[in-house]
Amino acid sequence: MQPVNPNIVATFAPPVMEARRWLRGVDFPPDRPLINVSQAAPVEPPPEGLRRAIAEAALERSDAHLYGPVLGNPDLREAVAAEFSTAYGGRVDPEQVAITQGCNQAFCAAISTLAKAGDEVILPVPWYFNHKMWLDMQGIKARPLACGQDMLPDPGEAGKLIGPRSRAIVLVTPNNPSGAEYPAELVAGFFELAQRHGLALILDETYRDFDSRTGAPHDLLTRQGWEETVIQLYSFSKAYRLTGHRVGALIASRDRMSEIEKFLDTVAISTSQLGQIGALWGMRNLRGWLAGEREEILARRAATVRAISGLPGWRLKTAGAYFAWVEHPFGLSSAKLAPRMVAEIGVLALPGTMFLPQDDPLGTGHFRIAFANVDAAGIAELAERLGSFVG
C-alpha cells in the first residue's frame, strides 16, 4: 500500500461536501422544495457587465491566457491598496498586497510563512473549518479560544493560551460561522496582545462588504508599524460573485511578501487572469451595485433575526453578514439532527459540531444558518419548518 500523510488522514472531511451527501436518495416535493442554508457562496452569476468584461478579455487579450506575476497583476494590487487605504484611513502600498487564488489560499499562504509543524495558532471557536483543516494538514496545533454568549472572543483569555510555540492569532470578522461583528476596540485589543508577544494577527475580512456598520470596522491600518503585526485577508468571491474564478487578496509587510511569493509560485504560479480582470472591473464599476447587494443582505439578516427569534425554544445567538448562529431546543446532538432535518422538513443546515473540537459540547446544541441565498419569503418558510420539526 502506498504511504499516506497521517496529517491528511487525521484531518476531518470537508463539511459542506459531507452535508451534500445527506441529500442522496431524498425527494423534495414541488410544494416543499429544499431550503439550503448550508453554504454561504453566491449562487447567481456576476452582473452582466462584469461577465462581458471577462468575455471580452478572453477574446481580445492574449495576456488573459498566460501566466501573470506571481503576486498578482499590478493594476489589481494598486486598486486593492487604494481601496483599503481609503476605507481604513491608513496607508497600504501596492507592494504590500498579494492576489491569491481565493481567500482560503491567502490564509494558507500566511500560515505557511508563519508556522511549521509543532507550532501553535490561536483560533476562536466556533472556528471556520477550512482554517482548522489547513492547520491540521500542516501539523500545526490549533489552540481553541472559547467565545462568550455574545460570540465574541476575549483578548485576556487569548493571552492565557500564548506559549513558546505560539505564532499567530486568527480573527474572522464579520465571523464565519457565527456572523458576529467584532467591535473596533476588541480588534484593537487583539492587535495589542499580538504586538506585545511578537505574534501575527491574521484578520480574515472575507465578509467586510456586508458589515452592518458604517465607516472603518477597525483602526489597525492607521497604526504605526501595523505591517509588523497585521496580515489582512479579503475575498472578491462574495462581493462580485466570483466564486468560480478564485480571487482573493492578502495584505502584509513587504518583507513577508517575498516569502508569500515562494508559496504562491509553488502552488499556483499565478492567480487566474480572467478572475483578476473581473475583480478589477468590479472594483472600478460596481460600487453602487455592491451597495445594493449589501442592503439586500442586511434585509435578509433582519428577516432572519425576526423569524428565528419568534421560534419557541430556539435561540438566536448572533447574526451578521451571511450567517446566524442558532441554539436548538432538542436533547439530541445537532450532528444527528441535521440529516433528519433534510429528510423530514427539507432543510439543509450545518451542525455546530462541524465548527468546534469534537469534545466541545457547544457544537451539539447549535446550527449555522447561512441565510444569504434565501429571500424574505424563504426565510419565513425556513422558520415555519424549523418550528414544525420534532427532534
Image (cartoon, rainbow, N blue to C red):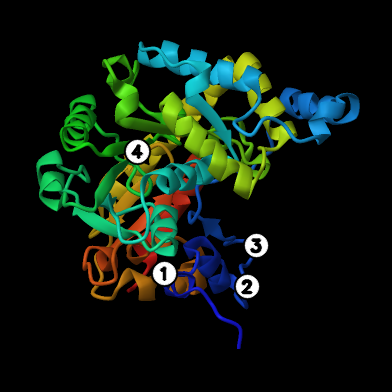
Cα distance in 3D space between marks 1 and 3:
21 Å
Q: Is residue 341 left or right of residue 315?
A: right
> Which residue has dot 1 on it?
338
Query: Residue sitting at 23 percent across and 60 percent down?
Result: 313
From the top left corner, tell me how far across and down residue 336 is, in percent.
37, 76
Task: For mark 4, give the secondary structure.
Answer: strand
Q: In the image shown, does 203 or 379 lie closer to the viewer?
A: 203
Q: Amino acid at mark 1?
A: Ala
Cα distance in 3D space between marks 4 and 2:
43 Å
Q: Amino acid at mark 3?
A: Pro
In which quadrant will I find the C terminus? bottom left
Q: In the image shown, does 256 or 177 lie closer to the viewer?
A: 256
Cα distance in 3D space between marks 1 and 4:
31 Å
Please report whichever mark, 1 or 3, sits nearer to the chain's N-terminal start: 3
Please state which of the two labelled residues, at mark 1 or mark 4, is closer to the viewer: 4
Please state which of the two labelled residues, at mark 2 or mark 1, is closer to the viewer: 1
Cα distance in 3D space between marks 2 and 1:
16 Å
> Which residue has dot 2 on it?
27
Give the label on residue 30, or none. 3
From the top left corner, tell me how far across and down residue 303 is, in percent.
39, 39
Task: For mark 3, give the secondary structure.
Answer: loop
Circle 3: is it few (<14), some (14-19), or many (20+) Cα within 10 Å?
A: few
Task: For mark 1, give the secondary structure.
Answer: helix
Q: Is residue 89 left or right of residue 372?
A: left
